[in-house]
Amino acid sequence: MQVPDFLEEILQNILQERSESREILNTVQDWLKQLKQSRFPVCKLKKAICGLKQTGRQWYRKLDQKLRSTGMKPLNTDSFIYMQPEKERILKLLVLYVDDTFVLSNDLAWIQTIKVELANAFKLRDLRGINYALGIKFAQNENRKRMTFQRCFEISCCVYYGRYKAI
């Protein structure tokens, strides 16, 4: 079992925000040490940590702080889409969806910079280009100048229900 790096930090933040006794925080820290040191780490949770509302909030708060420190701001209409304002015709977007982050830009140097910034703060896995997300199939030509989208979900529904003419 691997304990995510940010999990320990989030638990500490939650407990410190509640300003409850220091004993609880010490107990949790002892449990985490025991889990990391044991040969077969197993623990039974009375309430799933991922089910806590605070965990998602803490994760979003930490990510939001990091993105704002890089100059990005969430859109007023969609708080999960971040944009870095530019005077030139350069697109700099970062889209959050659950635990996925999509970096979109026509400035390749900026893409590398933001990846490094995020990698310094979080554990990342770079999956390269987008192939399939949110029921949409993405295809990009070889010189990376144009991206096309296909409606996979609608197509698969039409095929499933035998409505080929609707495609």
Image (spheres, rainbow, N blue to C red):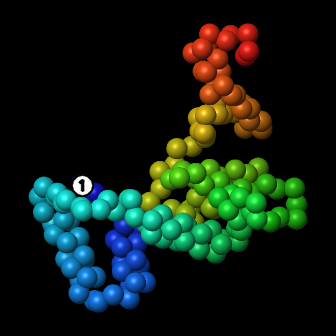
Residue designated by label 1: 1
Please name the residue shown 53% across and 52% down the image: 98
74 or 93, nearer to the observer? 74
For label 1, count other residues whose C-alpha is less than 10 Å away and answer few (under 14), some (14-19) or many (20+). few
Please state the horizontal and vertical placement of residue 157, each as a whole percent of the image. Answer: 61, 21
**Can I make out residue 109 in this image?**
no
Please state the horizontal and vertical placement of residue 26, each as a whole percent of the image. Answer: 23, 83
| In the depicted structure, whether residue 144 falls above or below residue 79 | above
In the orientation shown, which residue stands out farthest toward the left?
A: 39
| In the depicted structure, whether residue 70 falls above or below residue 125 | below
Q: Amino acid at mark 1?
A: Met
Please state the horizontal and vertical placement of residue 162, each as a whole percent of the image. Answer: 62, 10
Please name the residue shown 50% across and 68% down the image: 57
Please state the horizontal and vertical placement of residue 2, each as a whole percent of the image. Answer: 28, 57
Screen quadrant of the N terminus: bottom left
Query: Image check: 166 left or right of 114?
Result: right
Query: Image check: 9 left or right of 147?
Result: left
**Can I make out residue 34 in this image?**
yes
